[in-house]
Amino acid sequence: MEGRVRRIRQPRVAEIVASKLRDDILSGRLREGDILPTQESLFQEFGVSPPALREAIHLLETDGLISVRRGNVGGAVVQMPSADRTAHMIGMVLQARSATPADVSEALLRLEPTCAGMCAAREDRATEVVPYLQAEIDRQTAQFDDTAQYVPNARRFHEALVARCGNEPMILLVGSLELIWSTHESQVWGDDVTERTMRAALRDHQRLVDAIADGNTARATKLAADHLTTARRTTLAAGNDKTIEARLISHDR
């Protein structure tokens, strides 16, 4: 209809205040563990009513950017976004969609080899990738006789592989799936794992690190895919392929 004036929704006062504080957190002006200024200070800074300020705090709490302490201590504590908390949120969405561990492992089978190839392609891999992955292999080797440490150590290697790929969106998204899959593997295996399985995994990890160190992107990608295919088949055969349970995923590790 010609001449019709389009109405633009005006943001509420609480949203404006929350947006300013959100920017302070995400920009680093407020850091992990910092306490938000007192209500009196915020009243003076923004000149808003107590209900608007309380709503702004609630919005930030809903975002997961603060944790409100109640009781004698009081205060709102800043908590930065993290892969752990993202994994918990993704886990809830996956549970609501009846996704299974098999779905998560299939996604990782497609995505993690890409991260391995990206690690191998990094020009700074000799300092920013290889030492970190080798440290995880050394940990696996040192604790080889402790079967209870096998799954946590193996999962740390995979998480480090993703964390060192050099691309923040991949690190966040694939890293979140790694945490969800790690939870499932821990539930399935515990310390019930054979020496043959442990040695095979350790050998695969070392070959993968060697390929990354050589800068062989194609080989690193293939080795990662082959290893994940075997591990996926073994874990899913041993575990009950039920719906993802978000409550099992730690978001404050």
Image (tube, rainbow, N blue to C red):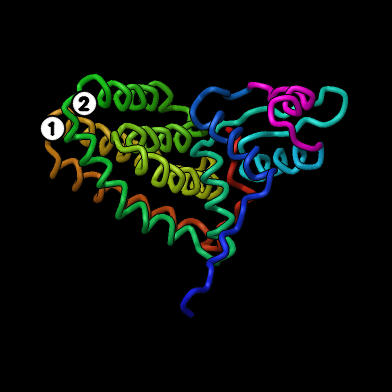
Tag 1 and tag 2, C-beta contact below 8 Å: yes
Tell me the SS state at disc 1: loop
Tag 2: Cα neighbours inside 10 Å, few (<14), some, or many (≥20)? many
Start-end of magenta stretch = 34-49
- Residue 239 lies, with reference to residue 191, above or below; the image says below
**Which quarter shows the C terminus?**
top right
Across and down, in percent, residue 241 comes to 51, 62
- Near-viewer residue (209 or 124): 124
> Which amino acid lies under the numbered mark 2 shown in the image of this protein?
Arg
Residue receiving disc 1: 215
Asked which quadrant contains residue 25, the reply is top right
Left or right: 19 as drawn, with respect to 174: right
Q: Dot 1 surroundings within 10 Å: few (below 14), some, or many (20 or more)?
A: many
Comparing 235 with 167, the one in front is: 167
189 or 16, nearer to the observer: 16
Circle nearer the N terminus (1, 2) = 2
Residue 165 lies left or right of residue 126; in this view the side is: right
Q: Is residue 7 above or below residue 73?
A: below
Q: Is residue 229 visible?
A: no
The residue that appears at 12% across and 30% down in the rendered structure is: 214
Residue 175 percent across, percent down from the top left: 42, 42
37 in magenta: yes
Residue 115 left/right relative to 21: left
Write down the residue under mark 2: 125
Q: In the rendering, at what x and y percent does residue 31 appear?
A: 56, 23
Q: Secondary structure at mark 2?
A: helix
